[in-house]
Image (cartoon, rainbow, N blue to C red):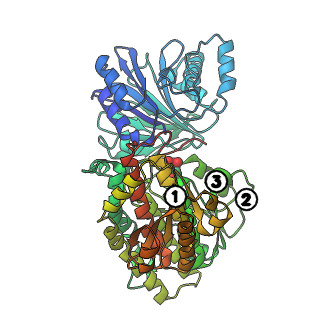
Amino acid sequence: MCGIVGYIGARDATEVVVSGLQRLEYRGYDSAGIAILNHDDFQVRRSVGKLSNLQQRLQEQPTHGQQGIGHTRWATHGGVTEANAHPHRSDSGEIVVIQNGIFENYLDQKRRLIEQGVAFHSQTDTEVIAHLIERETKAAGDFLAGFRRAMQQLQGGNAVVAMHRRQPGLILAARLDNAGGVVVGLGDGENFVASDIPAILDYTQQVLFLEDGELAIITADGVQVERLTGEPVAKAPQRISWDPVAAAKGGYKHFMQKEIFEQTRSITDTLHDRVDLENAQVMLDDLTLTDQQLRDIDKIYIVACGTAWHAALVAKFLIESLARVRVEVDYGSEFRYRDPILDRGTLMIAITQSGETVDTLVPMELARKAGVPCISLVNAIGSQAARLSDGGVIYLNAGPEIAVASTKVFTCMLIAAALLALKLGALHGRLDRNAMREHLQALLALPNKLGTLLQETAIYEKLAERYRHTSDMLFLGRGINYPIALEGALKLKEISYIHAEGYPAGEMKHGPIALIDEQMPVVCIAVKDGVYDKMLSNVEQVKTRGGEVIAIATEGDTTLRDAADFVIEVPQTLPLFAPVLTVVPLQLLSYYCALRRGADVDQPRNLAKSVTVE
Ligand code: G6P
């Protein structure tokens, strides 16, 4: 989704801003642009499509200066055109603006501005903001005062960054009402602003995060934060310890491939320092809820979207089974519209990679308003979900995930959910020391087992070749592997554009069986667990109707070797933890299918890594 970068200081602003935008490419976008203040005038360059188009434009029409802002846009209001790309200028050209989010009352404001004689050049809500700031700046006689007044008129979650031609040396940034993040990077004689930390990490690790209703006044020599109403806000800088090199591809062809192969390390990092085998305990130091508060919980809502929602479905199995606490899983986008019961004894858990998904953040706010504590399983440090979590966080520690399709963060989510379920299980008196130790040992053995799955990829290349012209695929699983069937189907459709459906295998006979013929490959997750025999009968049913079966089976399963057309074996583990392993072949299958079909693996069409609008 949209990315913001701004710079002021002695370096070449064009270079800093474009390199920042490159770091944000993973968020997904459909056009990009920059505005550089050059000899008291703005030089704006914009283009649709990939950032390389903008870079090409900059080669043809170079511009340099000591301050600038840039943006990658993911269209919401108005199509993907150069005119709709940011930055937008005000009527007189004195002000340039970039924005993330949705300006909900923009039509009202636009109508009023048109009545006042303002001419519009785009269909965006952002352009309205540029004109609004100009009108208010004229009325107030001052850019800062005008910016404040304009911001107070915007409804909806918005992050806005602006510059004024006649006020060189100044960048203003505001974060309104649950907008995507705004991070201010602090340098020596230079400062930065961005929507996400990776954009500025090459230059500084000292940052300030803006909260809702805060505004940053950024010059080369300093940053002042205040409320929109003008009261100063004292903020201590935070240090971000991510290594920018960790975000590079590191020899792999695609980020997604790198991230799949990093999972041994990433799940180890999720487990790191959290398992005390000797005393059979789980330590979740960033949770601020007391043990007593955790004991008092008798109902949990988990909210999430996309891949994280599948992790939430697995988490339900884990928590209900290990702690015997009731769990409901909701799509973040549905929760707010269904009048949920938020009462005492309820806990909300948000699961989110970015911590910026608006559909997940809104339910958290609803819970907080109702006095229900929230915790989050989140990857992005300091993200909004982390900051909204009054009950604390479990950081996934997966490191930056760049590919739009989530892989390593998904397995880390499963590990974090297992740790939480075990902790709750112990606190609710459902797990004695021996059971706890057995589960912890199984968890600690997972990285190694996952590693063995990454050693052999020939089978996926073979399958990708075989199914390169396939238009549909079905994924079946039962119990805790049903969410993995959903995830396998999602991964395949997201990056290879093959239509795929995930189904609970028991439901096959109630509908999808009608689709099965020689043209329909069916992936069956059939590991040795309590529903193994049922899965075997699903495999038979598919075979009887001419379908081809790719089975994900437990190591050494000779029955499936005979029954299925292709078998991918995964190491044995406790059935509750099997999803951490069964999902890996499905990630690899989708990766190789996408590769074979020549798709843009890391940035699939129409998708965004982080979706900060509803
Ligand atoms: C987008 C991404 C998905 C992701 C979902 C939730 O739709 O394309 O890959 O699973 O958002 O993102 P989150 O950051 O909240 O986990």
**Left or right side of 284 for 332:** right
Q: Amino acid at mark 1?
A: Glu
Q: Amino acid at mark 2?
A: Pro
In this picture, is 441 found above or below 591?
below
Q: Dot 3 corresponds to which residue? A: 363
Q: Which quadrant is the C terminus positioned in?
A: top right
Task: Between residue 603 and residue 1, name the one nearer to us.
Answer: 603
**Percent x, y of residue 577:** 47, 74
**Percent x, y of residue 393:** 50, 62
Within-10-Å neighbours for mark 3: few <14, some 14–19, many 20+: many
Q: Give the CA separation, mark 3 to mark 2.
A: 10 Å
- Which disc is residue 340 wearing? 2
Q: In which quarter of the view is residue 317 placed? A: bottom right
- Which disc is residue 518 wearing? 1
Within-10-Å neighbours for mark 2: few <14, some 14–19, many 20+: few
The residue located at (37%, 43%) in the rendering is 598
Q: Amino acid at mark 3?
A: Pro
